[in-house]
Image (cartoon, helix red, strand yellow):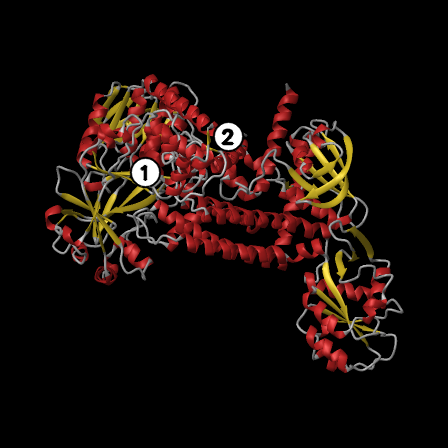
Amino acid sequence: MKYEAGTIDIAVIGGGHAGCEAALASARMGMKTILFAISLDSIAMMPCNPSIGGSSKGHLVREIDALGGEMGKVIDKTYIQTKMLNTGKGPAVYSLRAQADKIKYQAKMKHTLEKTPNLRVYQGEIAEILMEDDRVSGVVTAAGAIFRCKAVVLCMGTYMQGRCLHGDVIIPSGPNNLMPATQLSQNLKDMGIRLYRFKTGTPARMLRGSLDFDKMQPQYGDENITPFSFDNVAEDIKREQALCWLTYTNENTHQIIRDNLHRSPLFGGVIEGTGPRYCPSIEDKVVRFADKERHQIFIEPEGETTEEMYIQGMSSSLPEDVQIAMYRTIPGLERCEITRFAYAIEYDCIDATQLKLSLEFKDYKGLFSAGQFNGSSGYEEAAAQGLIGGINAARYIQEKEPVILQRSDGYIGVLIDDLISKGSKEPYRMMTSRAEFRLLLRQDNADQRLMPIGHEIGLVSNERYLALQEKERLVALEIERVKSLTIAPHAKTLEILEQYESTPIKSGVKLSDLIKRPELDYEKLAPIDEARPQLPADVREQVNIQIKYEGYIGQQLKQVDQFKKLENRKLPENMDYQSIQGLRIEAKQKLDAIQPTSLGHASRITGVSPADISVLLIYLEQQKRSSRDER
Amino acid sequence: MNRFNHLDDIIAAISTPLGIGGIGIVRLSGRGCIELANQLFQGKKSLLEKKSHTLSYGKIVSHGEVIDEALVSVMKAPQTYTKEDIVEINCHGGALVTRRILEAVLNQGARLAEPGEFTKRAFLNGRMDLTQAEAVIDIIHSQTDLSRQAAVNQLEGRLKREVRSLRDDILNMIAKIEAVIDYPEHDVEEETYGNMEQGTLKILEHMEKLLENADRGKIIRDGLETVIVGKPNVGKSSLLNWLLEEERAIVTDIPGTTRDTVEEYINIDGIPVKIVDTAGIRETGDLVEKMGVEKSKAYAEKADLILMMLDSSRPLETEDKEILSFIQGKKTLVLLNKTDLERKLSMEELEQYIPREQLISVSIIKNQGFEELIHGLKELFFSGESVKAEDALFGNTRHKNALFQGKEAMERCLETIRTRMPEDFISMDLQDANRFLGEITGDVADEEIIDRIFTKFCLGK
């Protein structure tokens, strides 16, 4: 029996990492919001690895934080080990990664949602989206509750028509044996939304006490930690860190896998979904890289109040008996007791080219979509989209322009632009190599890049924003000082240079020029810079990076300038590309389907050539002049 | 991104049809083009001080070398063809000099104009009226078709294959770095600086070779270095004079500004042919005539083209055979002179040394066989195609420019490696190089790096 359950502004469907950020952003922007989840105990669940961040994903978390999102703040409170990766590789690719206490993380996030004004969490499956014409008007739960609303953010993750597989066991299920969402897929299809079928997987969990860590290498966290959130300083969140462990597969492991490949649903053809190259199952690895003698396996704790350990590197969909045999070939795992078996999961997701860059569906007003349901993979990718989806759903109701990050603004911009322009044929993972301006999109300057936007839309407090402005002032001042300060070839100078095996100077040299030398940096030169003011660590870091890599940064800024020229040439909505003379047929079809927002956007669509862009340029000019002539 | 036109950067092209002789014009358009041209200009006044729509006389100097004397016109926006700043460099040195000036301009940072791009800008900047828009689109398309035709051309095909193999090497280097960056804790073996340096040097060497050999490009730029060989008194000087005096051949004098001598280029139907050691040859033609076998051998070693003279009215002699045996396998045309007389030469014997298609019968006295010579030349160097100077130059300058920029990126990469900058920066330079080379092969970088990472390395949780 259906019944009227009330009127709200925004319904967020799903309580995973996308849903949490979407609901928090929307509620904090003043929208009356309900987050619907099939089970409230699954809010902010990490159904796979117990960690947040990593290469490029760490960037996403920093950006989420700068915009006023929650993920970084929660992981800072619940991490059990943290590490800055790639520190030897250049500032653009420094990547923060933390092992999470899964249970605490979930509890903390759920509690945050519950305490947020305007926000209500609600246990229930959504079965139907209500539309009036082409505009969202409400949602209906499977139990019949009708909530009238103005906007909906779809964040269903991997729940849609989910089925979990290992061996010949196939269970209709969401992740981790949770109930799947079985009704909404059909409703969306009936509306005319195109769905894909994707696949991913997770490894087994084991009891800590059954593992022999003497046979593995311990993996430590950083001594000097870096928080994810710009709100935190290291001292505030410092705590004792847990250990992870490293071990390896061997020929015996691989032999067992090869002998049993026919029992894998993946190789037997039972799985129809497209799996990611980014986290292949151990079967995949053994088949595709047959000559590799061993594969790394990281053993990671799932939390402090559980004895379960996560076996990173060995996701699988082999039957249980094969899993037991294969895991037990691994040094340290010989007597392992499995608590949860590895499985593959198949689910419905959308073809994201149906969305605009705001994450709103092109054809349905007020209907937004975010997260793994858009064809991405990863908690961080999901959270980033959720945040943008939530913000833009609120902006839609506020009748304001959507927040759209460009590729030159942040990884979030790259992520969404890639998903929407190219559509993904497999679960999409963020990678630093996808960001063409990555030297500008560093994790250390996410605050400078994005916090002004977060502040403008009301997710970042005045106080926080003023602190950022103060930081920027100090950085600018110090850079100016360092650039104008001449260092004389005194004995002390020469001594320092010798200490770092740097070529001695013969006459006065600007301090900034010394900082640029590869073997030196801002900190190392402190002893010969007596007038140096006391500055916070984050200011010193900026000064160093901005001076040291000035040339390279300048080069990328120039490229961004060029990039923006095409980006700023907007294309009108609902263009009829078929009628434009001179476009090639393939380009017409692609442009028509995707309806790019700018010439830059159009240029990134596969199948659109430079000549097509020239034709569009001329067409736009024609249009502009005709409309001017009419006036 | 380089795949797509920028909207207002500086573009340049040769705007006179690439005929021979007369005046050549290199035209630049875009904000900053006056400053750019000024960096190459040596005259009484800086171009920056000149009023709009004025001509200045001076020299065009690149890397300390005077390329030519020139009249440079400066036209400031908006009253110009494109409504942008325009500079036109009028030089009088013919095709080769015009080309050198264009290259100097490109090396200075201008981009080679796309087909029809001046006209496109003129339209976009409101210079032309609406009815002309379609004509502009036609230009864009006809030129695209043209380059598509060019793509099936054999030489281009070979160039692309070479460039693909270069990109392959570069991509492998990128993938290795990126795999380590994106999967920091995986046991992907990190490349040492030493290995990366070697890899970069190998790529650079390959690039330099390609640049040197960019077949047509080189021929049109430098001319075919040609040597005339044959035993003494076989008629070498009359061949030279025939080539020089033949109506269809036009002599272009290039005042060699860093050289003391005057080199002469003979234009044989669009192919510039430079006869080795011809300084002042017309006066002292007998020098060529007297050139003996030993000297011929030395010249033939480094020549692009060997023209061998044989007297068909006499049988092959020992000296002839000696020359024939050392020019075997080189790009050679054998001219059988005196076909007006009775043939005494055994063709069977001759074909043991030189394939039939490289044998050309001429009669210098009767002025016969010139067409056949041209045909033979084209067969040898351009797979029989006609040399449309414009076409060849177009494709090639663009490709060469991209290759050149790719090489510059690799040179930066070498520097980055040698100063031990972090891998990230090495990858940036490599990706630049990869993008430039992609402009030649028409491949886009985007997904290919990621594809490469996952085909080469076993990664993932």
Crowd rating for badge 2 (residues with CA inside 10 Å; few <14, some 14–19, many 20+) = few
Residue A42 location, quadrant: top left
Q: Which residue is drawn at 72% across and 61% down?
A: B225
Q: Which residue lies furthest to the left in this view?
A: A209
Q: Which residue is drawn at 68% across and 39% down?
A: B40
| Residue for badge 2 | A574
Disc 1: which residue: A372
From the top left corner, tell me how far across and down residue B97 is, in percent.
Answer: 74, 48
Q: Are marks 1 and 2 on the same chain?
A: yes
Q: Residues within 10 Å of mark 1 (few under 14, many from 20)?
A: many
Height in image: B188 above or below A566?
A: below
Question: Is residue A209 shown left or right of residue A358?
Answer: left
Q: Which mark is residue B56?
A: none
Front label number (1 vs 2) = 1
Q: Image quadrant of residue A471?
A: top left
Expressed as whole percent of the image width and height from the top left, the position of residue B321 reads: 73, 79
A263 or A331: which is nearer to us?
Answer: A331
User: Hey, which residue is sitting farthest front in the picture?
Assistant: A491
Report the front residue among B41 and A152. Answer: B41
| The image quarter in which residue B8 lies | top right
Horizontal side of residue A391 vs A480, given as left or right:
left
Q: Could you tell me the amino acid type at mark 2?
A: Asn
Q: Residue at image x 38%, y 55%?
A: B456
Does residue B461 lie above or below A188 as drawn?
below
Q: Is residue B205 visible in this depiction of the protein?
A: yes
**In whole angstroms, how far apart are the C-alphas of marks 1 and 2?**
27 Å
